[in-house]
Amino acid sequence: MSPTPGLRFPFHRHHAVWKAVASATAPGEVAHDLQHVLRVYMWCLKLAPEAGADQDLAGAAGLVHDLVRIPKHLAERPLGGARSAAAAEGLLPEAGYTRAEIGVVVDAVATHSWSRGLAPRSPEGMVLQDADRLDAIGAIGALRNAAVAQAMAAAEPIVDGVPRAFAHPSDPLALADRPWNDGVWALDHWRVKLLKLSSGMHLPSARKEARRRHQWMVAMLGQLQSELDAADSTRNIG
């Protein structure tokens, strides 16, 4: 059963794609669930006209961009985009997409991943990169970061003798001169990736929204620091 029974799609082929994606997506890690797919999809639809992209194809790319989900703690995680692209190539003909259209969608999906470090080669690729990266930052991004950290800890609690945790015990905000390790400490991921995303958006609307979300994240780090300082001050009580 679809998790969004009342959802209406502006393109009839999107409904067929969504049904296939929903059917192929097993419940699991909530940071990359069907709600994430729909948020990215909606941003693809919104950004496509600004990029001069085909809205139908950009939306389809949003729907299939995480068709193959590889857990973050696995070494082959950077291959997720390429594997999703390959899976989409087999799924999209059933929704009525032509070979040429599928080529556009598949290329956008294959190049969207941050971990691959590839530049988009089409307007649809720019749209998908921006849409997916917007969902990685702001309040939603903070929740997703925590969800991924918990999933990684559940799968592999200890890495090289160090327990996975939300933050480094003596440098929680990753401000010290040390190597960042977001495979162990979740907040290191903010420095490694999340706080860099706003400066790399392609489209004006995405840049504007990314700046707003970035500012929220900076404010959250300030709030976190104040709470940690308050907790630390209790050591002198009594």
Image (spheres, helix red, strand yellow):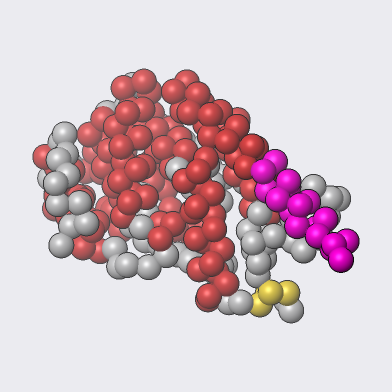
Which quadrant is the C terminus positioned in? bottom right
Residue 205 is drawn in which quadrant? top left
Q: Main secondary structure of the magenta part?
A: helix
User: Would you say residue 111 is visible in this rendering?
Assistant: no
Where residue 97 sits: x, y (%)?
Answer: 17, 43
> Going by the image, does 89 lie left or right of 209?
left
> Going by the image, does 90 lie left or right of 221?
left
Q: In this view, does 204 lie above or below 133?
A: above
Where residue 180 sits: x, y (%)?
Answer: 74, 55
Residue at 37% from the left image edge and 68% from the top image edge: 28
Where residue 127 sits: x, y (%)?
Answer: 39, 33
Residue at 50% from the left image edge and 68% from the top image edge: 151
Where residue 228 sits: x, y (%)?
Answer: 74, 53
Residue at 70% from the left image edge and 50% from the top image edge: 227
Q: In this view, does 187 lie above or below 130?
A: below
Q: Is residue 40 above or below residue 89?
A: above
Q: Which of 227 and 85 is in front in this view?
A: 227
| Residue 174 is one of the magenta-drawn residues | no
Q: What stretch is highlighted in magenta?
A: 222-238
> Going by the image, does 214 lie left or right of 127?
right
Q: Nearer the viewer, residue 137 or 85?
A: 137
User: Would you say residue 168 is visible in this rendering?
Assistant: yes
Residue at 53% from the left image edge and 76% from the top image edge: 155
Q: Which of 9 and 91 is in front in this view?
A: 9
Which quadrant is the N terminus positioned in? bottom left
> Going by the image, does 14 lie left or right of 59?
left
Residue 21 is drawn in which quadrant? bottom left
